[in-house]
Image: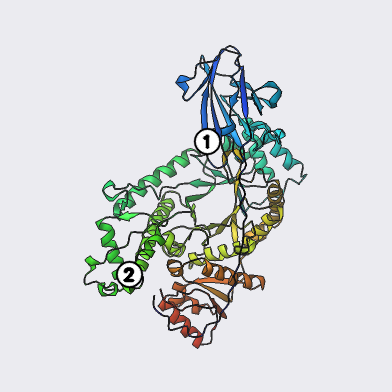
Amino acid sequence: MRQNKHFSQLVVTFVVLFSAASLTAAPAPQSLFARVTLLTPENHAWRLHLISHQPAGKSKSIFAGKTFADNAKAADFLPAGQATEWLDLTDFNSLSGCTLRFIFETNPKLEQGGVKAKIDIASAAGEDSILRSVTDHDPANIISVRIPADPSKDKNRILSIREDSQRRLDQIKALNLPDGPRPQKIWCMMGFRSNGEFYTDPAIAQIDFEIARRLGMNGYWEQNGGQPGELRKMAEANGLNRSTVYWRSVETPPRDKDLGGAVRMKWDALDAYFDKIYRNDIASTRKRHPGGMPEIIADLMDEPAGMNFDGAEFQQEFSRYLQQQNFSPAFFGKASWEEVKPIQLGWREFFARRDKLDLKDESARRLLYWSAKFWNNATARLYAIATRKVEQYAPGIGTRVNFGPPWWYDYGTLPRGIDAFEFGRLRSVTLGFNEDWVGSGNPRVPLEINTMLMDWSRAAARPNTPPLGCYITRDADRATLKLRTFACLAREAKIFDFYYYGPAYTFFDHWSDNFSMVQGVAELTRDLGTVDDILAEGHAPKAQVALLYSKSWPVWKKDDTEQIEQVMAYLALLHAGIPVDIVSDNEVADGRFAARNYKCLYVVNESIPAAAAGEIERWVKSGGHIWASGGAGKTDE
């Protein structure tokens, strides 16, 4: 970085926010015991595989027959009609509860009719300690039971999956909301996993799809290889006529063992690999939809990061990339291109590697910055190839990645290796998409700042104008759910994925047990349905004020104060009712910013590429107005 001569007079504004948290010792899990009796089939010996699923994604399992065992072969079959011993499952529960999955094996092998079982849940090993007895059935061999964190206190929440599904449906019915109208053009989706590992009964799955309909959804996730055929029929019957598919193969190219698992930068070979992978993925999805695919979005990756490249081709491409920027080896303090070696970067180690460099050496800083730019460019090229393959084999299907908010783990920025603006320049995806995670109303990341995510997504995509979408995450209640959605609608979002319904036993980031949010979603969709046509055609007002986003600043940041300064500047304009365009340093440097005739530019980034800073200076001298915070523009890239 060099002193930026274009900013000589600085306006200083600082916002310092503090938060405190208290630490308390975590309580121990409550005692938990279970006893299982297979009721039907009546004349079969049997044994049990029990798996505990915790909300944090952890699981434990045991096998039970006449005695406990670590594996199925060691578990002797129980005689027909005999119950297991009391199983001590205290360590199988968690401070957030768990779901117990009971998988039955019979001898002779179960042919048809399924299983029916009685499961006693107790606080100790004995009849007097039974909290609840659950009797349920399954057309195959799986019965699952949800266990609260404190089963003794909340024994009314010890429920089979069937009972839990009915409970959630009854809650929605009790709202007595009209059937519609439901949104038809605005996408309202929810992720949920129905059937599969926790039960096989389609009657339970039907309850889940009725819940989706009553919530006003018109889309769902087609996950884990696609919903089975019967479930897709249920989805269509309940008005869920669009979906997200997960063609996440961009990060699966063959790794080279000789390069420590890195990918060789052989673009022809990578193109051929993606051609085969995406052709097969798309053909497989079409096969699952013999009547024609519904309207679909292709999710290429969630919260992606930069690809790990290495090898001679990587070195050669880096030299070629730098020469395209009109650099010479001397710019990096070297005599030849063979001496200019890219710095190997990874998002988890980016700042640790940066801090090991001699940052007093300008050549070292230049090499780090342009290594980061090249790394981001190469990753964006991979996604651009994937998007072209989707367009080739599945015309009309949009592609997305969830960049994640830039204030979390440097998502969508150079240290992450996944620059959202480079994705826009190379058209690596055809939809703008992000996730908000602002429900807590943290003053540093306030509730309404998800509007900035939409403006950021729009800025990254220019000059293209793709549809914009957002995850509305589960940290919401009845009111904040609506406020967050309407905020994104006001910034032109048309696709909403309410992340992640669940049910609770299938995923930890769920809102199926958050009844306040459930109510908010059901009411919101009816509001949206009333004006669906207007919202679908609506556009955000044209902005006359811009906020600069310099892509270089995350490379040199020491903390998040600069990011918060940017958030607060945007927030102040938002509260004043002033529409804002976020503009990148590239847009400023190449003249697109000046051509739009903005009235004012707000600048908070300390590091601004020299080419952009020079254009800002010329724009101001020609009559433009600038607002600059303390330290803005004092260094270049």
- Cα gap from disc 1 to disc 2, whole angstroms: 47 Å
Q: Amino acid at mark 1?
A: Ser
Q: Quadrant of the N terminus?
A: bottom left
Q: Residue at x 69, y 47 (%)?
A: 518
Disc marking residue 59: 1
Residue 370 to residue 58: above or below: below
Q: Position of residue 532 (x, y in %)?
A: 67, 56
Residue 14 to residue 91: above or below: below
Q: Position of residue 289 (x, y in %)?
A: 51, 39
Q: Which residue is mark 2?
A: 364
Residue 96 to residue 117: above or below: below
Residue 571 vs residue 558, the one in the foreground: 558
Q: Amino acid at mark 2?
A: Ala
* 553 relative to 360 in the view: left or right: right
Q: Secondary structure at mark 1?
A: strand
Using the rendered view, name the quadrant where residue 528 is placed. Answer: bottom right
